[in-house]
Amino acid sequence: MDKYVIKGGCRLTGEVNISGAKNAAVAILPAVILSDSPCRIENIPDISDVKTLTYILKEMGARVEYLDLHTVEIDPRPIMTDIVSAEIARRIRASYYFIGALLGRCRNAVVPLPGGCNFGVRPIDQHLKGFVALGCDYSLDNGMISVSAKNDLHGANIYLDVVTVGATMNIMLAAVKARGLTVIENAAREPHIVDLANFLNTMGADIRGAGTDTIKIHGVQRLRGVTYSIIPDQIEAGTYMVAAAATGGDVVVKNVTPKHLESISAKLVEMGVTIEEGDDTVRVLCERPLRKCNVKTMPHPGFPTDMQPQITTLLSVAKGTSMVNESVWENNRFKYVDELRRMGAQITVDGKVAIVEGADRLKGAPVRALDLRAGAAMVIAGLVAEGTTQVEDVQYIERGYENIVEKLVELGADIYRMEEPERTLDKIG
Ligand code: EPU
């Protein structure tokens, strides 16, 4: 497995460009199959989850052509199947968006149960509840889920029992071409939900209220191909903001939507970091020591769970005792704390709460990236630690961070990637 080797202690300075949002891209790519002509998607991040999805699209029969590293043209017209084969799709969670998209396209979908980052039970009961309300039956067989609307899809009122990004987007995908009005109540409000709605509306859909907790979707008969540019990645931006703060740096994070970063900025300011917002930039300026603060993850506009490992790492080198409460995922999302402890962090976990005693310093050690964001946290820990840190299993990090090594080197970090001969994800094309 490939690793990152990081020599800690370098202060990050300069500018970093943020890529397109992973969690928008992974919904928008499957959504393209709802169109009856080609779409051009711009600002696509160059990450392995996107490569996996474009591979799946090709496997289904779509014509996929990269015009440059961040622009892809997809013609879904040649797709003749309603099946997503298991082998590749199982690797990523977002393959479940093909259920909603295939239902919208042809009223039938056979898709493997989702994989993705493993932090505890990740049910899809709310997705299924939505599909059933729209008129579908489903069954499970041999790890594949079959969902079908025998008597067509019809609009429905759907109240989500938990605020879920995945179910909100999946139901939107299925409802966009259903007959009549669908109302999703207690919908998630993340920026990528608004981005998916904007993409679909540009194609001719009629979706209102995305970004609020009530989304109304009037079904339309057809959607046409468009050119669309994906929003900047909130979590990639937040990760570089935390990395800058952790190293006492001065970094301008570029190509961002500052509004999407407010919950992250607010916590950094509480810790003593200076944040200067521009139109599409945030400058992060920090002189250590940092102050403690308490963080609770919540659905948007709360503090994002996908920033929890990174902020916990930052708090592990702040002065005082902080509390981090994970309220979106179960406490499995604290598994990485064991790795941080190997570097000298003083953190105890009690259920959904981590108590972080700020330490004077972390010490380099061999650690593992247990999932995408936990991996990013290990990189941040390596940047502040004394000595050398080796982060193993970096394939998790590369699922969602474009060129992380190059971007950090550009900011002055001492980090390189140690290649092992056998790599699998790159072969996906
Ligand atoms: N949940 C249910 N039933 C469902 C769906 C979700 O109980 O049918 C629960 C989950 O168990 C969890 C909560 O609802 O406790 C939120 O889950 P959500 O559906 O919002 O998560 P997701 O759609 O599976 C997306 C992102 C995650 C991110 C979460 C929360 C993608 C592909 N993944 O997952 O991103 O943590 O939303 O914001 O969009 C990441 O990027 O590192 C990542 C894991």
Image (cartoon, rainbow, N blue to C red):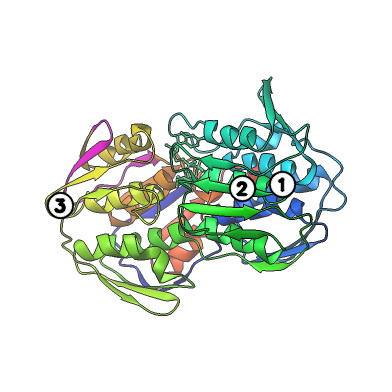
Report the Cα–Cα distance between label 1 and label 2: 8 Å
Image quarter of residue 268: bottom left
The percent coordinates of residue 233 (x first, y second) are: 49, 61
Is 371 placed left or right of 360 in the picture? right
Of mark 1 and mark 3, the one earlier in the sequence is 1
Dot 2: element: strand
Q: CA distance from mark 2 to mark 3?
A: 54 Å
Residue 182 image label = 2
CB of mark 1 within 8 Å of CB of mark 2? Answer: yes
Q: Which residue is mark 1?
A: 178
Q: Residues within 10 Å of mark 3 (few under 14, many from 20)?
A: few
Which amino acid type is marked by label 2? Thr
Residue 249 inside the magenta-drawn segment: no
Q: Amino acid at mark 3?
A: Asp
The residue drawn where x is 30% and y is 38% is 337
Verify CB contact (< 8 Å) between mark 1 and mark 3: no
Q: Residue furthest bottom?
A: 279
Q: Is residue 52 visible?
A: no
Dot 3: element: loop
The residue most toward the left is 320
Residue drawn at (22%, 42%), measured in percent from left and top?
A: 344
Residue highlighted by disc 3? 360
Q: Find the distance from the CA under tag 1 to the CA under tag 3.
A: 58 Å
Above or below 295: residue 194: below
Q: Is mark 1 within 8 Å of ligand 1?
A: no
| For discs 2 and 3, the disc positioned in front in the rendered view | 2
Select label 1 or label 3 by which is in front.
1
Q: Quadrant of residue 81?
A: top right
Residue located 53% across and 35% down the image: 126
Does residue 84 appear in this view?
yes
User: Residue 293: percent from the left, percent from the top?
Assistant: 18, 54
* Boundaries of the magenta span: 350-367
